[in-house]
Amino acid sequence: LLLFIMVPSAPIARAELKWDQKSVQREVMPRAEPIEMIFPFTNAGESTVTILSLQMSCSCTTATVEKKKYAPGERGTLRATFDPNGRSGPQEKSITVVTDDPAASPEVLLLRIKIPPLVEATPQTVSWTRDEAVVTKEITITAASNLDVRVTSAQSPEPNFTLAIVVDASGRRYRVQITPKSTALSTSAPIHLSLEATIGRPEDFLIFAAVR
């Protein structure tokens, strides 16, 4: 007679990173210097955890930790740096944290950043109807932040449109005057504005014109 006795196995000690926050929201000015955001964490498990890799969703983001191994109960901080230069509008970037805990899925940390545009256009597009009288229409370009922005040129691949830039307030407000040579035929085209801010690289901005 064989007797089988079930002996309960001891639970396997595991590591577990607990994050104080998994997303950070910031608003920054356009052309700002790189900004730093922090993600504190604690090893809430019963064994040492090793951070194997940090994977960024964008080259505009970097991330570092002080070291790779954290003992049970030990706290640490992941420091993320985001470079807003050349970007505008809402930005969402992620950092994926991979550890040696076989029971844990990779943790995704989110950086949500709002960057106002350099300029605003009112309206974004001007248009004429077919055979409408040939008149000049304007798009107003206004600096959208405290940075001074100059509109240095306006160019279009469509030869039917004649362009001129009027300075209302240098660095703050401009008017782009657009005149079609003819409204006999339908045509549309982007107009490329070259912008120069007080800091950062020159930037291209698009407005539009059309005969419909």
Image (cartoon, rainbow, N blue to C red):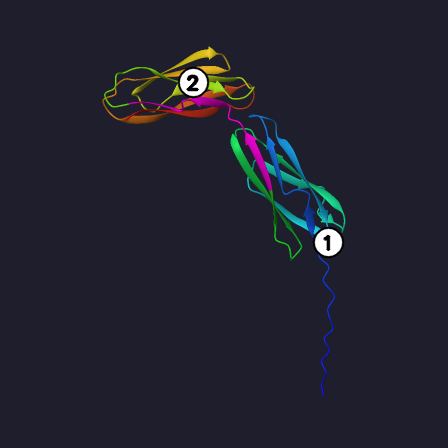
- The one nearer the camera, 17 or 153, is 17
Residue annotated with mark 2 = 140
Q: Is residue 145 magenta?
A: no
- The one nearer the camera, 42 or 87, is 42
Count of numbered badges drawn on the protein:
2
Q: Residue at x 42, y 26 (%)?
A: 206
Residue annotated with mark 1 = 45
- What amino acid is found at the position of numbered circle 1 in the picture? Gly
Give left or right: position of 7 versus 193. right
The magenta-colored residue range is: 110-128
Upstream in the sequence, badge 1 or badge 2?
Answer: 1
Q: Position of residue 188 (x, y in %)?
A: 31, 26
- The one nearer the camera, 114 or 54, is 114
- What amino acid is found at the position of numbered circle 2 in the picture? Thr
Q: Quadrant of residue 92?
A: top right
Up/down of 209 relative to 4, above or below: above
Give left or right: position of 128 versus 56. left
